[in-house]
Image (cartoon, rainbow, N blue to C red):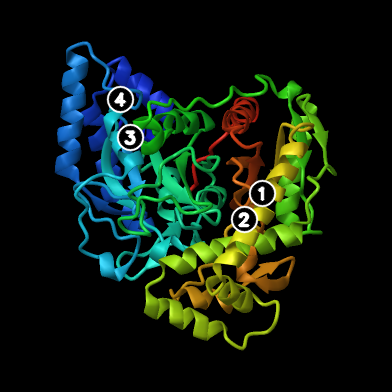
Amino acid sequence: MSTNDASKDTCFLTATEQKALLASRRISALELLELHLDRVRRVNPSCSAVVATDEDGARRQARAVDEKLGRGEMAGPLHGLPVTIKDSFAVVGMPATCGLEELRNYLPGEDAVAVAKIRASGAVIFGKTNCPPGASDHQSRNTLFGLTRNPWNPERTVGGSSGGSAAALATGLTSLELGSDLGGSIRVPAHFCGVYGHKPSYGLVSTEGHIPPLGHLAPGELGVAGPLARSAFDLELLLDVVLGTPDLEAAGAELRLPAARHDDLSSFRVAVWNDAQAFPLDQSYAIAIDGLVDDLARLGATVNRVARPSIDPAASHEVYLQTLFGVIGTRLPPPARETLIAAGEGAESGSYAQRVVDAVRQSLPQFVAATETRHHLFRAWHRFFANYDVLLCPVTPTVAFPHDAERLELEAQFTRHLVVNGATVPYMDNLAWPGLATVANLPATAIPTGRLVGGLPAGVQVIGPYLGDRTTLRFAQLVERALGGFTRPPSV
């Protein structure tokens, strides 16, 4: 077997499988790292997922891990696994730019909190992955590193903002990834690239050291950090490492998530929301989700295709937009904020331009009122999950769409469009389906359906009750075990 074949086979193993190889000493941490670095050199130029590396620092980490194993010690739960991190997190030894020109030369002096936990767990952090400027788009292009291309079709987006993260996993460049999610930024790229991603319940994982904002300690509303991987089992492996926040830990409090509600598919009560009555949805993508649901029913899960939480989805979307762009607006430099406002002034009533500008300019009483509305949504979902364990729904209206990111400023998204069932809809409708979970602080796991639409992977998000992360993850693991999981793109 050639070196290239060995690299390809080993690098596409799940993190759990790679961990077993390391533990049995069938491969060393340094050897596994070199396989991944070699693959980055050969494959990354075609997709531009990895945008920075620290090879010397990673080799030092790998040697230290190997020395520990030589003494009969395990370095930790991620012992020797080569890992990349989304370029919105601070990682010592590499720039942290979040795709922003003004941070081109920013070298953080310490790791982000979640990154430090990953490093302490024995992982070998060797690279950073691409994202859009300010982590604020469902495409991953910026002026620093260019465009990340989808390995299933280079003319299609990888999603965003953790687009480089998902592409790196789909092409076998990394074993695990740490991403972040405010507007679907973990789930959308996972869906578009055919991998797994988990948006944790809000508040479980520290976002300290995430950019933007730079240097802030206080967590922003809605935003979370979470894992991406080629297996749902790997998602839980990484989630367990990054769980917890500095404030809880300083108080001596240990964060314990409830166990999964069930351990077999036949015990799960599955609600399915897979129609276009609330939000746009391409019929070919809906058919792919229906195919997975048919499989679940055949496997014995209790499926209800009409159950819904007692919420108004349009009102839920409105308060999500108000909160989301209220948060984003506070992060914008004053010139960019004023440009955004100017672009939306005089816009048609009800347009995204008008709604975004209203959110950016909202008063504190308006933001507090939105918070109250969100708590009512939270309670409605809580009541719903008394009768159902998970809800399956689309991640976006379509599978990965063609690149449309020539203009990078946020206001450019006001004039973009998506094609859904042959008609155009506003580009920012991409926020609607992921916003269902985000606005109510719920966990959501993106998993492959096992089906392709136009040669592109189709994922689905599994939403669960607040703090029910192990329930959505266990459901995803059981589906993976029963039906199969990640499929390697033909081109890689």
Q: How many marks?
A: 4
Residue 371, numbered label = 2
Q: Are marks 2 and 1 in contact (CB under 8 Å)?
A: yes
- Mark 1 residue crowding within 10 angstroms, few (<14) / some (14–19) / many (20+): some
Residue 114, numbered label = none
Query: Where is the N terminus found, in terms of image quarters?
Result: top left
Query: In the image, what residue type sits under mark 3?
Result: Ile
Disc 2 versus disc 3: nearer the observer: 2
Task: Tell me the element at label 2.
Answer: helix
User: Which residue corresponds to mark 3?
Assistant: 118
Task: Tell me the element at label 1.
Answer: helix
User: Which residue corresponds to mark 4?
Assistant: 79
Q: Are marks 4 and 1 in contact (CB under 8 Å)?
A: no
Query: In the image, what residue type sits under mark 2?
Result: Thr
Q: Which of the two discs, 3 and 4, labels the residue nearer the N terminus?
A: 4
Q: Which of the two discs, 4 and 2, labels the residue nearer the N terminus?
A: 4
User: Which residue corresponds to mark 1?
Assistant: 375
Q: Residue 428 in the image: x percent, y percent? A: 61, 68
Q: Residue at x 55, y 40 (%)?
A: 201
Instruction: Give how far apart the Cα atoms at labels 1 and 3 are.
Output: 32 Å
Task: Tell me the element at label 4.
Answer: loop
Q: Is residue 244 above or below residue 85?
A: above
Direction from residue 319 to residue 269 in the image, left or right: right
